[in-house]
Every structure is written in C-alpha cells, then in structure tokens.
Amino acid sequence: MYLEIILGVLAFMTSTVAGIVGVGGGMMLIAILPGFLPVNALIPVHGLTQMSSNFSRAVFGYKDVQWEVLPKFLLGSVLGIALFSSILFYISLAYVPLFIGVYILLSLWSERFNEKIKRYENYVVAGFFQTGLSMVVGATGPLTMALLLKDYKDKDKVVATGAALMSITHIFKVIVFIFFGFVFFDYIGVLTFMICGAVAGSYAGIKLRDKVDGKKFVMVLKVLLSLLALKAIAGVIF
C-alpha cells in the first residue's frame, strides 16, 4: 500500500505542475517511475496515468480548448501510431530525444528557424511525431506545446488545448499496449491511486493557474520547455 500511496502523491504533484504551466508533469513522472516499477510497465502505466491527467485537464478547461486543431492532430496521430507501432521492434530510436530537444530549442528561441520551418510546421505533422514517438519516448508533450505557444497567447487556451491533444496521444498509446498484450489489471492498485492523484492534480493546477500572470506564464513555459529539451539532449549525449 505504501507504493500505491507514494505513486499517487507523485502523480498528484506532477499533474499539478502540468495543470499550471501545461507541460513538464509527464516528463517528471517518467523520470521518477523507474525507481518504482519494472521496465516493461513504465510506459504503459505512465501512458494511462497521463491520459487521465490530460483528459481531466481538458474537461475542466473545455471552454478554452481550440477544437479546430483537433481533427488535424487526430489525422497525424493515426498515421504516426500506425507507422511507429509497426516498426517498434525493428529500429533504434536512441537519438530521437536529441532531435526533439534541438527542435524545441530552435522553435522557441530562433526567429530564423521559425521562418524556415513555418511552411512545414502544422498539427498533422505534430500529431504524427508526438503520438508515434510517445510509444518509445514516453512524454512528448513539448513537441505540440511549442507549436501552441506560437499560435495562442492566452495561457488557458494553450494549456487546455495541449491537454486535449495529449489525451489523443495517450489514448492511442494505451490501445496499442493493450493490443500488444500488456495487462493493465496487474497494476490496478497502483493505477487507481495514480489516476486519482492525476485528476486531483489537474484540478489543483487549474485553480493555481489563475494566480499566474499571462506574460510571466509564457516566459515560465518557455524556460521549462527549454530545460526539458536540454535534459533530453544531455540524456543522449552523456
């Protein structure tokens, strides 16, 4: 029972962070879980917990979800999950976090890069890579958040829409792991506590987000995304 309680509290804390700034909770959780769960359960358990966290955050903030981007993202997600799940066991994706990290840093801080990439950057492509790569990377939220941050300046729209898109990603991921034979019921105790913690964290994050200034929010989000990107790059290099 101690394990379940600890993981429930950790899920609450990381979901609260994501509820405030829109990103970071998933990466924090995937970094913590190896100390508590076997390797084969890490991404499936993380995926179902994050599905609950993101879906509840999107439901709590449904008025701010920018629904027009969902069909494009959904199309990309279907293509991405179909490709990556079919080649999952045949390719090495060790350098994927490096490319994600570099992309996020350039996208956030380089005007020249944004001018070059603008003609190719869209929600279909984002859905393809975010959902496909989530099968192996675990937490790919920063990919879409970097795009949303450029399209929407309102913090509630960014967080709520990002949560809706990540919900799609994790739903597909959970379905694929069920198809591959992972038995979620074997971890029903852990999952119950983590899902409850994640949903409660989403609610707490929304309440705390109102206390954050809009301009400060954008800067905090940029800095957090940059730190996560640097962490991903360092993980590959070192």
Image: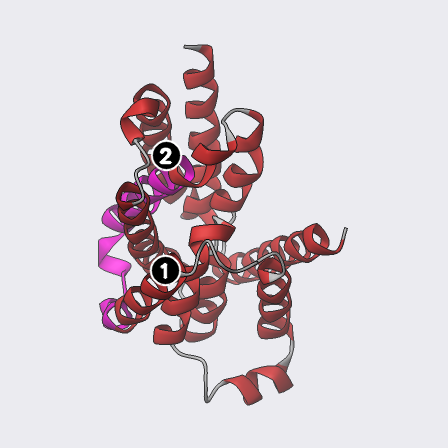
Q: Hey, what amino acid is under mark 1?
A: Ser
Residue extent of the magenta highlight: 45-71
- Quadrant, the N terminus: top left
Q: Residue at x 46, y 16 (%)?
A: 3
Q: Nearer the viewer, mark 2 or mark 1?
A: 1
Q: Residues within 10 Å of mark 2 (few under 14, many from 20)?
A: many
Q: Hey, what amino acid is under mark 2?
A: Ala
Q: Position of residue 224 (x, y in %)?
A: 59, 54
Inspect this view and state whether residue 208 appears. Answer: yes
Identify the secondary structure beneath mark 2: helix
Q: Is residue 109 left or right of residue 49?
A: right
Q: Residue at x 64, y 78 (%)?
A: 110
Q: Are marks 2 and 1 in contact (CB under 8 Å)?
A: no
* As drawn, 78 above or below 52: below
Nearer to us in this view, 111 or 216:
111
Inspect this view and state whether residue 211 appears. Answer: no
Nearer to us in this view, 158 or 176:
176
Q: Residues within 10 Å of mark 1 (few under 14, many from 20)?
A: few
Nearer to us in this view, 182 or 137:
182
* As drawn, 67 above or below 34: below
Residue 69 on the magenta span: yes
Q: Position of residue 158 (x, y in %)?
A: 39, 62
Q: CA distance from mark 2 to mark 1?
A: 30 Å
* Magenta stretch, main secondary structure class: helix
Which residue is the site of mark 1?
A: 86
Residue 224 on the magenta span: no
| Residue 198: image tag | 2
